[in-house]
Amino acid sequence: MRFALRRLGFFVVTLWVALTLNFLLPRLMPGNPALAMLAKFHGQIGPGTLHALEVLFGVNTQQSLWSQYVTYLHHVFTLNFGPSLDFYPESVTSVIGSAIWWTLGLVGVATILAFVLGTGLGIVSAWKRGGRLDSVLPPVFVITSAIPYFWMGMVLVLIFGFTLGWLPTQGGYYVSTDSPGLNWIFFQDVLSHAVLPALALIITLIGTWILTMRNTMITTLAEDYVRMARAKGLPGRRIMLDYAARNAILPNLTGFAMSLGFVVGGAILIEYVFNYPGVGYMLLQAVQGEDYPLEQALFLLITVAVLVAILIADIATALLDPRTRTSG
Amino acid sequence: MSLPISGVPTAVDQPAQLPGAQPGAAGPGPAARQPTTHALTRMGRAIRSNRKATVGTVLLAIFLFAALFPGLIAKDDPGADAYQPKLGISTAHLLGTTAQGQDMWAQLVWGTRNVMIIAFVVGLAATGIAVLIGVAAAYLGGLWDGSLSLLTDVLLVIPLFPLLIIIAGYAHGGGTLVLILVITVTSWSYTARQLRSQALSLRRRDFLEAAKVRGERRLYIIVVEVIPTMTSLIVAAFLTNALYAVLFASSLQFIGLGNPNTQSWGTMLYWAENEAALQTGQAMWAIAPGLCIALLGAAFALLNYAFDEIGNPALRPVRRRRRKRA
Amino acid sequence: MRRLTAIGAVVAACLLAASCSAGKGGSGSNNSSSNNAKTASSVTISNENGALWTCGFSPFNGSDTLLSVGFVYETLVYQNALQSGHTTPMLASSWKWGNGNKTLTFTIRNGVKFNNGSPMSAKDVVYTFNLIKKFPALDLTGDWAVLSSVTQSGSNQVVMTFKHPAVPAFYYIAGQTPIVPQAIWSKISNPVSFSDPNPVGTGPYKVNPCTKQNITYTANPNYWQPGLPNIKKVQYPAFTSNNTANDQLANGQAQWGSQYIPSIKSFYTAKSPNFHYWFPPTVNVSVVPNLTNPLLKNVKVRQAISYAIDREKVSSIGESGYEPPANQSGIVTPTFSSWQDHSLASKYNYGYNPTKAKQLLASAGFHPGSDGIMVNSKGQKLSFNCINIGDYSDWVASMQVVAQNLKAVGIQVTPDNLTNTDFTAALYAGKFQLAYYDQQTFGPSPYYELRNWLDSSGTAPIGKTAATNYERYINPAVDKLFTQFASSTSDSQQHSIMNQIQGVMLSQLPIIPVVQAVDWYQWDDSNLSGWPTPNNPYAQPAAYAYPDQGQVLLHLRAK
C-alpha cells in the first residue's frame, strides 16, 4: 500500500512539473514568442478568445504571474485548452480527438509487438549462449538501436514503397477514395498504410529489448535456484521459461514502461516521415504553424500518457515481484 | 526514493540494479580495484582484445579524422552550388551532386564536424551534470538525495523529444548553439541515475570506509576516491549521452528545427526530404547521411556495449573450444 | 514465451498478407484513377493547404474564399489576368462606364437562381456591396476605398459611383467580389464571424458534404448556364503535407494539382504520358532593400546587386527551373510581355555581369577589404543581413545562390531564416536590411503588383507597419503616375505611363526582382479534357485561384 502511494505521489509531482514547465516555457523564452503568434492571428479570432489566449500565454496582461498560473491550472483541469489556431475555430480537444486513435493504434501495437518479439528472442539467445543466435543478434541489434528512427522509415519507404511498390508510403488511408467507418475497404487501407510505419518502429525498438532481456537472463541464469533446478533434472525449456525468464523479465517491465518516453519520440519522427495522421505528426505541424495552444495540449497529453503507462507498469511489477515492494 | 530500474537503452547498469542484489556484488567491479592509471592501460588492452570495442574505436577514429581534417578527404566547398545538379556517382563526385548542385561527398565530410562538435560538447556537458548530480545525491544523502533524485526521476520520465521539439520551436529553430544547449539541459537524467546507483553501491566499500576513518573530508573522498573508481561508468555515460546527442540533434535538424544553412548530416536529410529525394531517384542523398548517423551511433553503442562486457565478464561472448580428437 | 512469440508472428503475418492485398489494389496508378473518375464525371484536386478543413465557407473569410468563391459563389464578371484582362460576363450581362469613369452601371442577368432555388437579382448585388461597406472586415478587396455608393436603378441595374476614377479597381469590384443572397445574410447578426457551413450561392456547385478530411462539391441543379457543369462531383481532400499531396498526383488519384513538386519530371510527368504541368508566371520575387539604410541608399550599390545576381542560376537551382528569371523592369514575362519597353531595358542592359557590378562599386568608392568584403573610405562594409521565410525551402535555397553570387563581387549577405510570423513582423516594421519576398497581388496588368511596391500610400516610417511598400520608397512623381494610370482607359495612355514606371524601376531600383513566382498547376488528361494550357490560357489554372477555378470546372468535360 505504501508503495502504491509513493508511486502515486511521484506521478503527481511529475505531472505538476510538466504542467509548470509548460506554463513557464513561453514566458522564459527571450521575447515571448506568443506575442508574435497572437499578432498573426489578431484579425482572425474573436476578441474574447484573443483575451483568453493572452492570459494563457502571459501576453499584454495585467495579472500577476501567480494569478495567471492559477487560471492556467484551472483551464487544464477543466480540459479547456482553448481554440486551436491552425484549425480555428475548432477547439484543441476536438482536434486532438481525431488524431489520437491513429497514434494509439500504431504505437501501441508496434510497441507491444516489439516487446514480445524482443524479449522472446532475448530469452532464446541467452539460453543458447554461444550459439549462432547469440553471436549474431547482439552486435546486429546494437547497431540497429543506434539507427535514427526516421532513417529507418525512409529506408523502408525506399525499398517497399518505391522500388518494390508493395505498400503505400503516405498517410493513414486513401483520403480521397475512402469513407472512414466500419467497412472492409477502409479497414484494409488502414492496415496497409500502417505496415511500413509499424515495421520501422518495431525494428528500431526491438534491439533494445533483445539486448536487455538477454543480459538480464544471463545474470539470472547464474543464480543459485537455476542451478538447483538444473541439478533436479528439470527439462531445459521449463527452466528457461518458468524459472529464469519469469524472474528476468520483471526488471524489464519497468524498463519497458520507462522507455515509452523514447518510443513516443521515435513515433513522432516516424509519423512525420510517413505523414501518418497521429498526435506526433500533429505536434510537429503545431510547432511549424506556431499553434501554441495545440502544442501545449499535445505535450501535456503525451506526458500524461507516459506517466500513466509507467504507473501501471510499476504497479504491475509490484504485484508480480514482492522484492520491489520492500526495497528502496 | 529509488525506482527498481533496469537497463533500458544500454545494458550498462544491469548488474548493479537487480532487486535484491547485494551492493557491489556484481557491479562493474574489476576496474574499481585499481587506481586510475592502471585503469587506463587496462582499458587500452581491453579494447584491443574485444572485437566490438575494436570496431567501435575504428569507426569513431574515422569520423574524428573527418571532422578534424575534412579538407584532406574532400576538396570541394560543401556549400557552393557550383556543379550540375542531380549528378550520379562518378570519380569527380564520389556520391554525386544534390538537387542544388552541391557535391554530396564534400557535404558529408564537412558535415561531420558539426555532428562531432554536438556529440562531444553535449556528451561532456551532460555527463558532467550527471556526475555532479548523481554522485552528490548518493553522497549527500537524506534530503539532498531525495530532492536531487526526484528531479532526476522527473526529468527522466517526461518525454524528452516532444519537450525538445517545443523548446526548439519556441526558439524558432536556432543554430548549433541552441541545439547543444537545449539537448544538454534535457538529457542528463538517465546517466545521472546510473551514476547515482553506482555511487550508492560504492559507498560501503572498504577503501572508502578507510578514507573516512582516516578523517578525509567529504569533498576529498568524492573527488579523489569515488569518481576515479567510477571511470568506466563515466566513460559509458559519456558514450550514451553522445549517442543521444547525435540522434536528437539530427532529428531536430531533419524536421527543420535547426538552421537549414549549416553543413550537417541532419540538414542534408532535411533538404533531401524537401526535394523528395527518395521519389525522384536521388536516394543517395537520403541514404548517405542517415547511414553516417547510424554508423557513428553504432560506434558509440558498440563501445558502450564493449565496456559493459569488459566490466561484467559474465556477458562476454562464449568462445567455443575446439576439441582435439584423440 | 515461445508460444506467445509464435502466435505473435502468425498474427503479424496475417495482417501483413491482408494489407499487402489492399496495398496492391489501391496504389496502382491506372487502377485508382479510373476508380476515381468512375463515370469520368468527377475530378479530384490536389492542393496542399497545410491544415484540415474547418468546413467554413464564408466568401468574406480570407482563409475560406478559395473554397467557396468560384465553386459556390460567383462574381459579376470574370476577368482573366492571364489574357490581359479579357472579360466574360457572369452575373452581370453587361456594364458601362460613364461620367468620366466615375460611374459604373451593371445590368444584372435575368433568370439566375441561387442553389436553393430562389432567384438572384440586382437587389442581392446592392445588398452585398452595402454589407461589406457596413462591415469593413468583409471587404477583402478594398472596394470601398474607391467606391462612394452602390444603388439599384430600375429592376435590373446597379449603379456604382466612385470617389475618383479608378478603372483598375474593376478587377476587384466586378471580378473578385462574391454576390451573396440578401435573404440569408440579412438574418445573420454577426457576418464577420459567420462561418457559412452551408453556402448558398449562384455558382455551379454545392457543398455536399464537408468533413475535416475532404470536401465534396456536387453540381448545382439550378445553375444558370444550361448543361453545365459537366463534371458532377469535385473532391477536394485536405492535405497537411506537400509530400502526401504530391503522391496523390503521382499515382493518379488526383487529376488537378496545384503543387510545388520537386524534380517534377521524374516525380510526376515520367509516370504517365497524360501527366502535364504548366507554371504561368504571375508576380516578381525580389530582393527588397531597406532604402533607409545608408549604404543601400546609394543607387550604385543597388545596381551592383542587380548585376551580380545570376538569375538563371537562382531559377534553376533554387526553384528547380520552375520560376523563370525576372527582369529589372519588374514586368513579368511572358504574361505581360506586351507591356515591356524593350528599348528602355536594353539601354540599361541589366543581366548577370559581375564585372560591371564590381566597376559600379569601385565608382561608388568601395574597394575590396582584407577579408574580400567591399569597404569604403569611411570603413563601412558592404555586409548585410537578409531576412527570409525559413519555411519556404525553395526561397532558402534561392537565397543561398544569391548570397554566393553577391559574395563573388565582395558583398557579404547573411541569410536570416525566420518563421512566417517573425518575418512579416520584421518586414512590415522595416526592421531589416535586405529581405526576400513576393507580393501575391496579381491582376490583368503590371499595375497591381508595381503599385503595391512603389506607391507611397502603402508605406510607413520605420517602426510602424507598412502595408505593401516595405522598402520605404517615397516618390510623389511616381505616385502621380499610378493615379494617372488609374484614371485612364485609353490603352496607349496606360502603356506610356507603364513605360515611365519601368524607367523608374530601371534607374532607381526600389526593388530588385530575381525570379518570377508562378501559379502551380498540374493536370491529368487521361479522362478529362478542357484544361487550361499555355496555348489556351482561358483562366488562371491553379486550384487555389478564385474565381478562376470555377471557370476551369465549367470548361472541364469527360473525354
Image (tube, coloured by chain):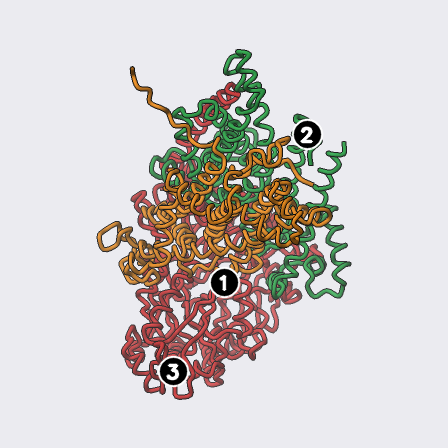
Chain colours: A green, B orange, C red
- Does the rendering let one see residue A246? yes
Q: Which callout, 2 or 3, points to the residue nearer the camera?
A: 2
Q: According to the image, label 1 marks what residue?
A: C175
Q: CA distance from mark 2 to mark 3?
A: 73 Å
Name the subunit of mark 3. Answer: C
Query: Label 3 neighbourhood size at 10 Å, few (<14), some (14-19), many (20+)?
Result: many
Of the pair C9 and C176, the residue shown nearer to us = C9
SS state under label 2: helix
Q: According to the image, label 3 marks what residue?
A: C375
SS state under label 1: loop
Of the pair B130 and B37, the residue shown nearer to us = B37
- In which quadrant will I find the C terminus of chain B? top left
Q: Position of residue A290 (x, y in %)?
A: 57, 56
Are the numbered discs 1 and 3 placed on the same chain, yes or no?
Answer: yes
Q: Is residue B171 left or right of residue A50?
A: left
The residue type indicated by label 2 comes to: Ala
The residue type indicated by label 1 comes to: Gly
Query: Label 2 neighbourhood size at 10 Å, few (<14), some (14-19), many (20+)?
Result: some
